[in-house]
């Protein structure tokens, strides 16, 4: 990191520490440098009595963050490097830190918030969405599996809503984000500049009283019956079969979406979600996600998915294996084995935490 690096703007405004993810040309996609910069700022502000609140926003007006910098992951995979594993190790530590931050951590989830963007926002203590919010964990579309604590959050969503979102990668708006537990408050985007200004002068609770509005209705609540019934199946194959059998347009559309995703990623994602429900605290789930993410580096689907969606943009990935039936239980189990470079171990009590 250099003094000239401006990928995260760090400043204080009155009683607020302000973090602005500042790569608008890449929809503020997270790099390793950005993760370290955010962590460094949180360390300083945690021990600064003048900073009473931390606020994170995204530059450019299009969204908070579109996820991790997957171009860099693709380059690292091609070079046979270890940079991606190092990035995830620090990123997941940051996700856990945000979840336990001792001061109000206000995440403004305006516009696009996906993947790693969810990781730096949805674990915060105050999560604000707007009418422009579009939130997703779209990893299965690039041969990857929801991470950054995503499987933890989605496993806690009502019924099987989280399973639906994890497997399809569907984008949701403010109402559904609130329903699924990914956000806390709805604020009109028009009011954000004034809200941010007030946070520099007043306690968070007082500011929220002025700006929180009734959220718009979401869509998922009206689909709970078929979502819970279909996604409650024990295998991805059975989920697809149940969706096909519903005879409803929305369920059929979900099935059509699933068959375009990486078969391996779908099966690993379902297993990761079901395991997350039994693992206990978020830290244990992040440790599992680290295993899964490192295993994905050895899978042909991650490189192929990034190629198809981001590099060549032909949107025609060639998955290996190509069908759900060809993905064996042993193939899935390999994703949960300890990584060759060592496990990620996260503290679960304040006494163990390094900050």
Image (cartoon, grey):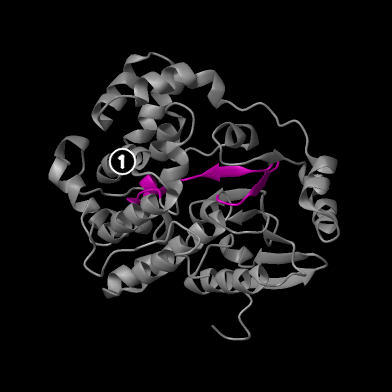
- Tell which residue pokes out farthest to the front in this image: 351
Where does the image place residue 355, in percent across and percent down from the top left? 53, 70
Q: Secondary structure at mark 1?
A: helix
What residue is rendered at 44% in x and 26% in y? Answer: 159
- Residue 53 in the figure: left or right of residue 169: right
- Residue 131 belongs to the span the image colors magenta: yes
- Tell which residue pokes out farthest to the bottom in this image: 3
Where does the image place residue 295, in percent across and percent down from the top left? 25, 58
Q: Which residues are magenta?
A: 123-146
Residue closest to the eye, 138 or 155: 155
Q: Give the total of numbered labels.
A: 1
- Residue 146 in the figure: left or right of residue 267: right
Examine the rendering and report whether any part of residue 304 can be seen: no
What residue is rendered at 35% in x and 56% in y? Answer: 287
Where does the image place residue 5, in percent across and percent down from the top left? 61, 80
- Residue 294 in the figure: left or right of residue 206: left
Please name the residue that numbered disc 1 is placed on: 275
Query: Does residue 196 sit above or below 255 in this rendering?
Result: below
Which image quarter is the N terminus in?
Answer: bottom right
Where does the image place residue 156, in percent across and percent down from the top left? 46, 36
What residue is rendered at 37% in x and 57% in y? Answer: 306
What residue is rendered at 56% in x and 44% in y? Answer: 135
Q: Quadrant of residue 304?
A: bottom left
- Residue 212 belongs to the span the image colors magenta: no
Examine the rendering and report whether any part of residue 31 can be seen: yes
- Residue 252 in the figure: left or right of residue 271: right
């Amino acid at each position: 990191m250099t003094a000239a690096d401006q990928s995260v703007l760090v400043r204080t405004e009155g009683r607020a520490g302000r973090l602005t993810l500042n790569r608008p040309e890449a929809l503020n996609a997270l790099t390793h440098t950005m993760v370290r910069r955010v962590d460094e700022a949180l360390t300083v502000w945690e021990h600064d009595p003048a900073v009473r609140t931390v606020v994170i926003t995204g530059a450019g007006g299009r969204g908070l963050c579109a996820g991790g910098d997957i171009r860099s992951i693709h380059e690292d995979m091609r070079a046979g490097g270890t940079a991606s594993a190092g990035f995830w190790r620090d990123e997941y530590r940051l996700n856990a830190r945000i979840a336990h931050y001792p001061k109000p951590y206000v995440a403004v989830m305006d516009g696009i918030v996906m993947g790693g963007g969810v990781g730096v926002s949805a674990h915060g203590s105050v999560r604000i969405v707007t009418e422009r919010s579009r939130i997703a964990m779209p990893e299965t579309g690039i041969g990857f599996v929801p991470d950054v604590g995503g499987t933890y959050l989605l496993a806690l969503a009502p019924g099987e809503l989280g399973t639906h979102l994890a497997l399809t990668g569907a984008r949701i708006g403010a109402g559904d984000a609130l329903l699924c537990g990914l956000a806390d408050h709805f604020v009109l985007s028009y009011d954000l500049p004034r809200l941010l200004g007030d946070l520099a002068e007043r306690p968070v609770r007082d500011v929220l009283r002025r700006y929180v509005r009734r959220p718009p209705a979401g869509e998922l609540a009206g689909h709970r019956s078929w979502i819970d019934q279909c996604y409650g199946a024990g295998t991805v194959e059975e989920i697809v079969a149940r969706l096909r059998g519903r005879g409803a347009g929305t369920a059929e559309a979900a099935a059509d979406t699933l068959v375009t995703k990486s078969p391996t990623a779908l099966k690993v994602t379902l297993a990761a979600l079901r395991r997350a429900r039994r693992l206990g605290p978020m830290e244990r789930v992040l440790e599992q996600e680290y295993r899964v993410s490192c295993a994905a580096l050895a899978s042909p689907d991650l490189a192929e998915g990034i190629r198809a969606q981001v590099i060549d943009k032909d949107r025609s990935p060639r998955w290996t294996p190509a069908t759900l039936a060809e993905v064996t239980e042993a193939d899935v189990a390999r994703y949960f084995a300890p990584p060759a470079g060592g496990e990620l171990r996260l503290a679960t009590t304040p006494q163990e935490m390094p900050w």
